[in-house]
Amino acid sequence: MPPAELLYSQTHLWISCEDDIVTVGITEYSLDQYGDVVAVELVEPGIDLNHGESMGELECRRGVWELFAPLDGEVVELNKAVVQQPDHINDDPYGEGWLVRLELRDPQQLEHLLTAEEYETLITEPPELETEEEEEEEDEFNILGS
């Protein structure tokens, strides 16, 4: 199970909050999906991000993963150690492998993040698939030109 004291985004980032500063990193599940991180590019401190805006990218063994801000805020610090040595992320994603620190613009956004239990459910339960009947109805709907 992911660390219980953290919050999580649906895009597989973890968030630790101390006052109005949040630390953001990637989850172990992300590493399992994308493979080891081999290069890191992050936005510089002073950049103001809105939820969903790019805050950098990770080059992993299985491709490039663009990172999107999980919350609105100003980048107040980036982890230079992971930029220089990406293995920190692979070795300790929930500790020394953190990515950026943001000064939150709206602390109420934290309410939209997942608890460790909710995140565990997200990564272990397969998404619901449409039944054949729902697919047939959708096909019929499309055939009618709607």
Image: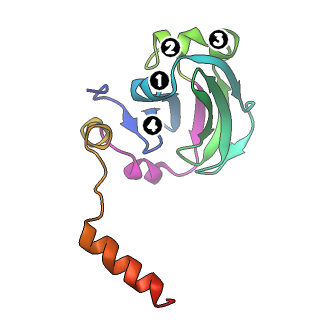
Q: Residues within 10 Å of mark 3 (few under 14, many from 20)?
A: some
Q: Are marks 2 and 1 in contact (CB under 8 Å)?
A: yes
Kind of residue sitting beneath label 2: Asn
Q: Is residue 51 magenta?
A: no
Kind of residue sitting beneath label 4: His
Please determine whether, in this image, residue 145 is positioned above or below residue 48.
below
Q: Earlier in the sequence, mark 2 or mark 3?
A: 3
Q: Are marks 2 and 4 in contact (CB under 8 Å)?
A: no
Does residue 59 appear left or right of residue 3 in this picture?
right
What residue is shown with label 4? 12
Q: Residues within 10 Å of mark 2 (few under 14, many from 20)?
A: many
Label 4 residue SS: loop
Q: Residues within 10 Å of mark 4 (few under 14, many from 20)?
A: some
Could you give the CA–CA distance between mark 2 and mark 4, rounded to whole angstroms?
Answer: 15 Å
Q: Position of residue 21 (x, y in %)?
A: 53, 34
Please determine whether, in this image, residue 20 is positioned above or below residue 101.
below
The magenta stretch spans which residues?
A: 99-115
What residue is shown with label 3? 81
Which of labels 1 and 4 is toward the front? 1
What residue is shown with label 1? 31
* Residue in the picture at 63% in, 19% down: 79
Which of labels 3 and 4 is toward the front? 4
Kind of residue sitting beneath label 1: Leu
What residue is shown with label 2? 90
Which of labels 2 and 3 is toward the front? 2
Q: Quadrant of the N terminus?
A: top left
Label 2 residue SS: helix
Q: Position of residue 130 (x, y in %)?
A: 30, 64
Label 1 residue SS: helix
* Residue in the picture at 31% in, 29% down: 5
Residue 96 seen in the current view: no
